[in-house]
Image (cartoon, helix red, strand yellow):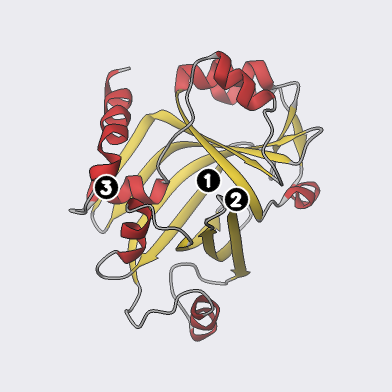
């Protein structure tokens, strides 16, 4: 049974209905699954979650444009486990035609806080967007488009708890003319408000012996395509590459 067929068995939720579960301030947990594991997991949780549907599409196309300094200071902050770090990106929701400029903050309390504004053209920083970024980015170093990521996302919403679960598929990392795609890997991220609790999504992952822990998509793409320091990420990257090509 394919992921597409399983997703059709979920009850739908619209974009406007999902506004009640934005979770712009939240806790996150990330997991890596093979596609076979993903199918098993989706079957087990389908009665507990609704799936986002936009124009009859349930697996939606996304594109993110990440910005960093020429020395990749924002990447290094993540690699070095610096507290109160952040990422700067444009995100495009291709089916709905919506684009945001987002600042994603990771606090020293372990929470993720997202600040964003609507934009007309993703990937180009206008004076208005510079003003928005300057609220968080205080360095005099310029920002450059360091990496783009294209992928497909399934968004699930818990029927009873303030929880969203995203599933990212077919991740393609693009750096100018160089790209790399992970075809056999799904990234599951559980996003909850307030104190995290173990819901059906996580309990099934635990029963499948899938451990929490995955580096961010931005850091993974940078480590795969750029000559950057990656000592902290090497064990996870080896596992990701092996899983993608040999399972």
For mark 3, what is the residue? 223
Query: In the drawing, does residue 130 fall left or right of residue 144?
Result: right
- Image mark for residue 243: none
Name the residue at the bottom extreme.
Answer: 127
Which of the two discs, 3 and 2, labels the residue nearer the N terminus?
Answer: 2
* Pick the front one: 158 or 182: 158
Of badges 1 and 3, the one in the foreground is: 3
Q: CA distance from mark 1 to mark 3?
A: 23 Å
Query: In the drawing, does residue 93 fall left or right of residue 198?
Result: left
Which of the two discs, 1 and 3, labels the residue nearer the N terminus?
Answer: 1
Q: Residue at x 30, y 41 (%)?
A: 233
Q: CA distance from mark 3 to mark 2?
A: 29 Å
Circles 1 and 2: CB distance less than 8 Å?
Answer: yes
For mark 2, what is the residue? 95
For mark 1, what is the residue? 61
Q: Is residue 67 above or below residue 203?
A: below
Residue 166 x, y percent position in the rendering:
59, 38
Graded by Cα atoms within 10 Å as few (under 14), some (14 to 19) or many (20 or more), the crowding at tag 1 reads some
């Amino acid at each position: 049974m394919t992921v597409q067929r399983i997703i059709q068995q979920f009850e739908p939720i619209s974009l406007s209905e999902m506004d009640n579960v934005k979770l712009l301030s939240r806790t996150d947990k990330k997991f890596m699954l093979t596609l076979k594991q993903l199918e098993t997991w989706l079957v087990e949780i389908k009665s507990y979650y609704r799936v986002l549907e936009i124009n009859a599409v349930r697996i939606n196309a996304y594109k993110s444009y990440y910005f960093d300094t020429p020395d990749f200071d924002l990447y290094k902050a993540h690699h070095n486990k610096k507290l109160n770090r952040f990422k700067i990106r444009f995100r495009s929701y291709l089916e709905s035609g919506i684009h945001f400029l987002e600042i994603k903050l990771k606090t020293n309390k372990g929470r993720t806080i997202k600040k964003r504004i609507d934009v007309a053209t993703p990937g180009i920083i206008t004076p208005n967007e510079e003003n928005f970024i300057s609220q968080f980015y205080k360095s005099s170093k310029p920002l450059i488009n360091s990496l783009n990521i294209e992928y497909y996302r399934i968004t699930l919403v818990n029927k009873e708890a303030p929880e969203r679960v995203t599933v990212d598929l077919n991740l393609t990392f693009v750096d100018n003319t160089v790209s790399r795609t992970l075809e056999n890997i799904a990234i599951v991220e559980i996003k909850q408000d307030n104190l995290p609790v173990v819901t059906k999504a996580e309990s099934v992952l635990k029963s499948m012996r899938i451990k929490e822990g995955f580096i961010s998509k931005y850091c993974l793409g940078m480590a795969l395509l750029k000559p950057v320091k990656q000592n902290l990420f090497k064990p996870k990257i080896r596992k990701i590459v092996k899983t993608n090509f040999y399972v």
